[in-house]
Amino acid sequence: MRPKQHWGFYGSLVMMTACCGSLLGNLVGAIMRTVLTDKQLITWGWRLPFLSGILISFVAMYLRDHGKEHNPNAGEYADEDDSQCNNNSSKESPLSEVFKRENLPALLSSFLTPMMWGGGYYTTFVWMAIFMEVLVDPPIEHGFWVNACSLLFGIIIPLPLAGMLSDRLGRDKTMSIGVIGLAILGPFMVNIISSGQAVEAFFAQWIIGLCLSLFGGPMNAWLVERFPPHIRLTSAALGYDLSHCTASAFSPLIATLLVQNHGVKAPGLLYPLFAILTGSGMLISTKIYRYGGVTDNDQNEVQMATSSKPKLNPVC
């Protein structure tokens, strides 16, 4: 819904707000560990974060009453209720189109590319707090607070700047700088964090965060640009979520096993690994397939043409 030349910035805002949710969770953990004893945490304190989820109901009610729908593909796809309206909706579902041969390289790319962001983020800003307070010897006091500060200054604030940079410099160049930086600096920064010093740990985690921001800020725009306009959200969502189900979900477990079996410096090897997978994903999709020659520059015309199509019969 925004001009193409600003997609990097607006896409980074979406990622930034998601990270704000992580920051809120981090602050809840930090406050609970500061205020409550270990016995209180185990007995009843662990319930508080789950109960706080009730607050999201107010957001849902606001969206229900004040949200505005945006559906540029209205009437594009047939479904079970459109059997009597074949003239208005002739295309198959967007999910089936995603798996067409011409879109498979882009789908594989959207699966591999987010692994650097997902695996790197979960390792650095979700698992790292436990790493600092529990697994490092000597432990870093107030590791959750160190983690929260690093997340704020290393990810949340720089993300929009990275998105704007990609609008000027280009998505691939900006993201490549972040990937290369993580591959080279990641293991060294984990080595510094494992020394058990809070100040050094903050700056090391902050540097990792800056590299992640350079990659993650443009990533949303980069993902949707891999696909034809009318299936881009389905495609990007599918690849992105599959990546999170694998790289993001298992990276904390793998990092813990690496500590147990190979020492506190070993989790740093995850950054070069994810960098290789992500770099492979970026290289796979070197050409975006467009139905009928439609390009991103034609997106406004596509939306105007779609919105001007006859609406479906209310009976349908």
Image (cartoon, helix red, strand yellow):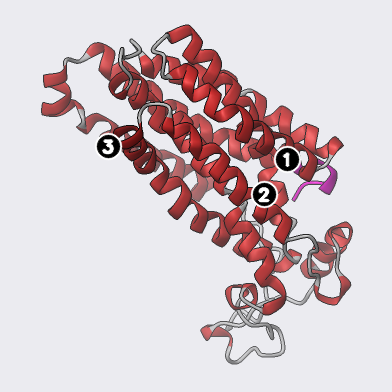
Residue under label 1, please give it: 176
Name the residue type under label 3. Answer: Phe
Whether residue 219 can be seen here: yes
Residue at x-position 31% and y-position 37%: 261
Amino acid of disc 1? Ser
Horizontal and vertical percent for residue 208? 58, 26
Quickly name the residue at label 3. 50
Are discs 1 and 2 less than 8 Å apart at CB?
yes
Q: What's the residue at 41%, 14% (across, down)?
A: 195
Return the residue nearer the eye: 127 or 84.
127
* Left-right relation of 168 to 208: right
Residue 156 seen: no
- Which residue is under mark 2? 279
Residue shown at the point (58%, 83%) measured from the top left: 316
Quarter of the image where one finds residue 232:
bottom right
Q: Nearer the viewer, residue 235 or 194?
A: 194
Front: mark 1 or 3: 1
Q: What element carries label 1?
A: helix
**Mark earlier in primary sequence (2, 3):** 3
Say left or right for 187 vs 138. Answer: right
Residue drawn at x 35%, y 13% is 140
Q: Find residue 27 and report its horizontal and vertical position in percent.
A: 39, 21
Where residue 115 appears, x then y in whole percent?
55, 48
SS for callout 3: helix
Span of residues in magenta: 1-8
The mark that comes first in sequence, 1 or 2, is 1
Q: What residue type is labelled 2?
A: Gly
Whichever of labels 1 and 3 marks the residue nearer the N terminus, that label is 3
Of 142 and 56, which appears nearest the observer?
Answer: 142
Q: What element carries label 2?
A: helix
Query: Residue 106 lies in what quarter of the image?
Result: bottom right
- How far from the left and from the top, in percent, is residue 303? 80, 63
